[in-house]
Structures are given as structure tokens and as C-alpha cells.
Image: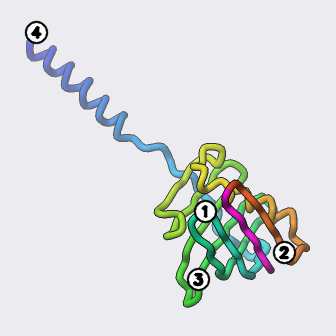
Amino acid sequence: MGLRRNTAISLCALGFCLASCQTAPRHQFPAPSADWQVRTGQLAYTDAKLSLIGEVLVRSSKNGDFELTFTKAGGVTLLTLRQDAQFGQIEGPLARGRWTGRIAEAPPRFRGWFQLRDKIVNAHRMTTVRHEAGAQSFTLRF
């Protein structure tokens, strides 16, 4: 009886370990393709602690997929953002690391960045896009 009990406990523990080690599948963002709209220009970004001006590359699909890359002179990437209707990913030195998840659950410091998608996509014919989000200010010139 003791051997059966130990075996049963061991199997339960193994099952628990395997179940807890399982990770949720990562959200997959589509790769940009030839039919995506591409815009380049400058982005002036300010918040309570800093002010930066750099180059911006924006790509968007008809399905609402969106990418933004913010770089400084010399091609140094400051921030990369990928987004669709519900999920977002942001990374780089300006983001202080990397965050991925549901946009509705984004930390406050990223919310202004994720709001840019709608501002830019809806202003596809405009040469200047401005957005204020709390202490963050964005001015894009295409």
C-alpha cells in the first residue's frame, strides 16, 4: 500500500509540475507585406522627464495591424511598437525593456504610445499628427 501511495503522490506531483510549466501561446503579429501602407517622418516626443526628436517609420495594414519604429540619428532604435486591435508589444531603451499583452492592460507609461495607432491610421492624408496623453506629447510630421 505504501508503494502505491508514494507512486500516486509522485504522479500527481509530476502532473502538477508539467501543467504549471506550460506557457500560454504567444500572440503572433503578422509580418508587414507589400500591401501595407508605409509612412516615414519625424516624431517629437516629450514626457515629464525627457524630450526627444527622431525619425519614425510607420506601417499599417487594412486589417488594423500596426508597427511604429522610432529611431535617433545614426539608426539607433529607441522604441519599436507592434499592435493590432487588442494586443500590443513595445520594446527598446525608451520603453525600458519589453512589454507584451492586451492593450487594455498596458502600463500607464505605454498607453499614449498605443493610442497613436488610431490617430495615425485615421489621419492618413494629414502631414501632421498631434496627440496628448497625460504628461506625454507626440507630434508626428510625415
Task: Give x and y (percent) for residue 84.
Answer: 69, 55
Q: Kindly give the residue lying farthest to the top in the view shown.
A: 1
Task: Give x and y (percent) for residue 123.
Answer: 87, 67
Crowd tier of the residue under label 2, counting other residues whose Cα lies within 10 Å: few below 14, some 14–19, many 20 or above: some
Image quadrant holding the C terminus, namely bottom right
Q: How would you classify the magenta stretch by its main secondary structure?
A: strand
Picture residue at 35% right of the left edge, 35% below the top: 20
Which disc is residue 48 wearing? 1
Mark 4: which amino acid? Met
Which disc is residue 128 wearing? 2
Q: Earlier in the sequence, mark 2 or mark 3?
A: 3
Residue 127 belongs to the span the image colors magenta: no
Nearer to us of marks 3 and 4 is 3
Picture residue at 70% right of the left edge, 75% below the top: 44
Q: Earlier in the sequence, mark 4 or mark 2?
A: 4
Magenta segment range? 135-142
From the image, tell me which residue sits under label 3.
72
Q: Are marks 4 and 2 in contact (CB under 8 Å)?
A: no
In this rendering, is residue 11 above or below 106? above
Crowd tier of the residue under label 4, counting other residues whose Cα lies within 10 Å: few below 14, some 14–19, many 20 or above: few
